[in-house]
Amino acid sequence: MEEIDGLIKTIRTGDLTARREAVSAVVAFGGEAVDPLVGALINAEDNDVRWYLTRAIAMIGAPAIDSLIYLITIPDDPDTARYAAAALGEMGDAALEPLIELLDDDDAQVRGFAALALGRMGEPAIKRLVEVIEESEGLRQRCAKMVLYRMGGEGTEALARSVMEE
């Protein structure tokens, strides 16, 4: 744990090269590094530091999904939630279903961050979003349509096809 803490300190205070090297090194710890990285992200005040921490968390992948989903749902911390959504958007299929579940959350901000992450995901999310449109009604369906629309390109084409089939 001491080594992970040292790498996080380098991410916070190092120069560009040191930060990049620290991110690569902390990722090698895998799931063991998730909680310390998430704690650092919650406490980070600098957007550059948030970006590097988020990058490390995203590179760890599936072991970080539950923690990132939690970060999206923290009230009154939109900056952390935005970075968590960006990390989830980089994870592809592993984060797809947890994000889909958030599309009908009671909190509009949580839905928005889930939509942001799905939009960042791009092509891997398109098929599942079309399925959500076909299977759902109400809020979840509207959110899925909005995500596809905002994706543009393939997302907009998939939305148009699904609407024409209704």
Image (cartoon, grey):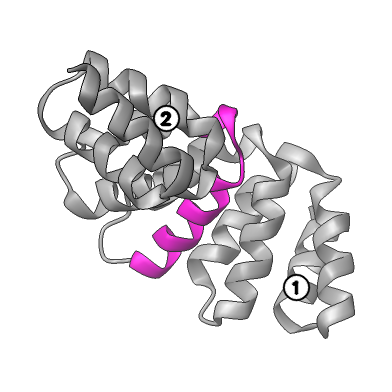
| Residue 11 image label | 1
In the picture provided, is 85 more to the left or to the right than 111?
Answer: right
Image quadrant where residue 11 sits = bottom right
Where residue 101 appears, as percent x and y from the top left, is 32, 28
Amino acid type, label 1:
Ile
Q: Is residue 16 above or below residue 56?
A: below
SS at badge 2: helix
| Residue 70 image label | none
Q: Is residue 159 magenta?
A: no
How packed mark 2 is, by other alpha carbons closer than 10 Å (few <14, some 14-19, many 20 or more), is: some
Q: Is residue 82 magenta?
A: yes
Amino acid type, label 2:
Pro
In-front residue for pair 87/153: 153
At x 21%, y 38%, the residue is 105
The range drawn in magenta is 78-95
State the residue position of label 2: 98
Choose the circle earlier in sequence order: 2 or 1: 1
At x 50%, y 36%, the residue is 66
Q: CA distance from mark 2 to mark 1?
A: 28 Å
The mark closer to the camera, 2 or 1, is 2
Where residue 4 appears, as percent x and y from the top left, is 79, 57
